[in-house]
Amino acid sequence: MTIFVDIAALDDIPPQGARVVRTAQGCVAVFRTADDRVFALEDRCPHKGGPLSEGIVHGTSVTCPLHNWVFDLNSGVAEGADEGMVRTYPIRVEAGRVLISAELVTRSHAA
Amino acid sequence: MKKKLVVIGAGMASGRMLEHLFAAAPDAYEVTLFNGEPRGNYNRLMLSPVLSGEKTYQDIVTHDADWYAAQGVDCRFGEPVVKIDRKNRVVYSNKGGAPYDALVIATGSAPFIIPVPGKDLPGVVTYRDLEDTNAMIEAGIAGKNAVVIGGGLLGLEAAAGMAARGAKVTVIHLMGHLMERQLDPAAGYLLQKDLEKRGITVHCKGATKAILGHDRAEAVLLEDGTVYPADLVCMAVGIRPETRLANDAHLEVERGIVVDDAMRTSDPHIFSLGECVEHRQQLFGLVAPLYDQAKVLAKTLLDEAAEFVPVQTATKLKVTGCDLFSAGDFAEGEGREDIVFRDPGRGLYKRLVLQDDRIIGVVMYGETADGNWFYGLMKDGTDIGEMRETLIFGPAFQGGSRLDPMAAVAALPPEAEICGCNGVCKGTIVNAVEGGAVTLDAVRACTKASGSCGTCTGLVQQVMAFALGGAVVEAPAGMCKCTDHTHEDVRRLIKSMGLKSIPAVMQDLGWKTVGGCHSCRPALNYYLIAEWPLEYRDDRQSRFVNERNHANIQKDGTYSVVPRMWGGVTTPTELRAIADAAEKYDVPMVKVTGGQRIDLLGVRKEDLPHMWADLNAAGLVSGHAYSKGLRTVKTCVGSQFCRFGTQDSTGLGIRLEKLLWGSWTPHKVKLGISGCPRNCAEATCKDVGVICVDSGFQISVAGAAGMEVKETEHLASTPSEDEAVEIIAAFVQLYREHAKYLDRPYRWVAKVGLDWVKERVVDDLAGRRALAERFEISQSVYRRDPWAEHSTRTETPRWAPLADLTLEAAE
């Protein structure tokens, strides 16, 4: 079972936007959609390393700001003609708080 | 001997529980019922018809005195319970005690009061029970101003009820659209439109700062400075479980009173249900799960095994004329897909959220007859793969076999009207196609179908496809995959239909996706800014990263910072401030740009607001080196120093830059001002160039020096600097009002023709002045430094990471 840790209030993330969480495994982009769903993806486009957290969020997709690759926030898989994917992490919202998988805190010990 | 059951709270949940209990075992318990309100159980869901005057209290009573008497219930109404003595199993009200064998806490919820100054003034009410409702009715609100804080279910019902009683109602809602927990932005927009039609003002993204007034509420002040007069203020921002009694009795309480699957609290003799409980970390506000709890608790009290399993519930708004339906779990999940149907003409919107070929969410607006059918499919987890193509059309379209989505069009009679603007029916279009018009343009040319407002374009294409036997019809080049409308159509319709938000455009022009895409969103944001400068508020989340962060993103995710240098002129003080900032923030590269200013490259995002606070303090403002807007005005030194200079080209450049800066345009705009025909400022390859001559100013436009190189074309000559400035402002405004997003001026002029431009900004003096005035209206909003609002104490932290888990890991 996934253990979650509280990282912030939902309102700290703009709707149709994202914020970055620094982790021992690199930066993770935490997205909030227009209907208040949240997603956590590796903040690094597999194409040229662009920060996905700075992309335009539309529906449940995000467009990389560097060269317009589009990723599905659910799966982390590139859409359309581009091939590639980024890691996704368990995340959820509870009572207005954003909780992210505790693996992002603990794995650094093993590493 | 009968066991003693004490119930605290005569609400809908405990009322339903007692019904089940008496029906199953009328003689099991001797019941004592306490209630703080001086009355028994009534249907709280029907308070809004009472408020609007459609019903009276008598109409909504569910259990009257006769019912309680028949069941032998000892009613202690108007007696709030003050204490639970768990050790001796006695409950005390303000009047006396009652012993129990079993105790049910059903204290419900209390309205949440936002802690703003003025919240305790007379005239500030909540909306939870009959007292609140009567207070609003008795305030005699007809003709008065009422403000409702909170645009959720409860707030909107209060607003509609007061409006029905003749009040002038304003709803203030913190979020971007109404009922954001149940509706997506598109449906929220339609709801807002319907409420506005009834005269209710809706202010979204409004944070209440204070309620103003001396002896009683007089007005509501928002954080953005807006003030709404208010004789009555109704707070309906939310509820919290009423847990004080349980807390005092040291029962386990989290957000609500914690109960297990049998509705038992941490004390085996005490049970709880309703809005005051928390079950598996979940709270409950809608009535359906509360009724399920009632059923379970009645069984538990009779020592029968029962388990409460919360199910998803659907929401409907009880406001006459606003037809909405929302159901399902919109929480996070993977592999979701949407089916969206919009009919702008009738204000319809339907959206199904699918996962693994099953419906997991439904949002409908305008026509909700199929809501329960979708809800049924969702609850049953029905595999909809077979009927997916016609699913959104509802049960009427689900035959035994897979249906053709064209069936709806095929079924229309020949006289069915397709294009409302021009009165073109299906038969006419079919005849045109059979007569050889096989492209949309050809059909438009010979029938006028979809030639006016264009909203029926999709339908016309379907009729054509039907007439051609399913052959592919060429689609017009839409803005992007989200719409078949062209940029030009969208601009025209935004104006003619008065569309003032991105959800409004997407709904009324029938967008095919839920939230647009990276291509159409920035374009729509620009078109709305250009059309409604005073009313539309810039949507930062629809901007490309550079314009959102007011800096240029670089390949490694750092940014470049370029302060404005008016006309390329700077001072030792400014240079010192730039040098200090470069050192303080470890800027890896300082470079002089082609636009006569200085670029600081490699700045980290979280440093941007700090750096700009320093630069602002030295009087420097953003150079907008990242924007689809006014970039630079490049000048030469002109008559002030140059021995060849004929006019003060530097001064004119500074004047133009101070006039134009901050404006948003379809693409970037660069100017060059040269003091003589030697043209040291390279003005003849800019979007707008001025060559100063002895007799005055030669203005030319539509140059390019990028992927294409093109010399400017002469627009006008004038002896007057003032006139030159007005012509340039009018040209920029004409470009702003007509060009397609991402067309540089040279592309746009090539499309409309230089003569067309000349007629409007040179020959037609009144038209030129009007253009310049419209530009000035827009500039009254946008001629300002973005960093003034971003480098504030509250905003600066938002530029840093949300959390740093590397620190926690180290601990």
Image (tube, coloured by chain):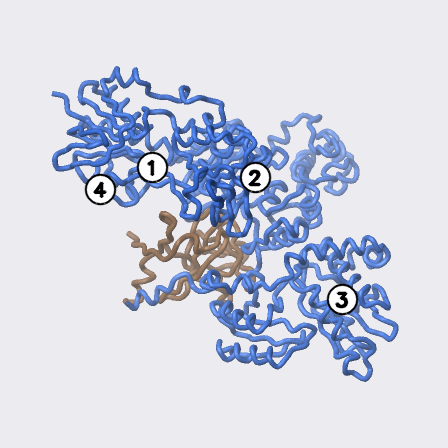
- Which residue is rendered at x = 77% and y = 80% of the image? B640
* Nearer-N-terminus badge (4/2): 2
Label 3 and label 4: CA atoms lie apart by: 75 Å
> Which color has been applied to chain B in this rendered view?
blue
Q: Mark number for residue B221?
A: none
Q: Amino acid at mark 2?
A: Thr
Distance Cα–Cα, label 2 vs label 1: 28 Å
Q: Is residue A94 left or right of residue B675?
A: left
Q: Nearer the viewer, residue B519 or B443?
A: B519
Secondary structure of residue under mark 4: helix
Q: Which residue is mark 3?
A: B688
Q: Image quarter for residue B268?
A: top left
Task: Where is residue B64? Give x, y as percent.
Answer: 33, 18
**Which image quarter is the C terminus of chain B in?**
bottom left
Left or right: residue A26 versus residue B556 is: left
Residue situated furthest front in the rendering: B215
What is the C-alpha distance between the residues marked 1 and 4? 16 Å
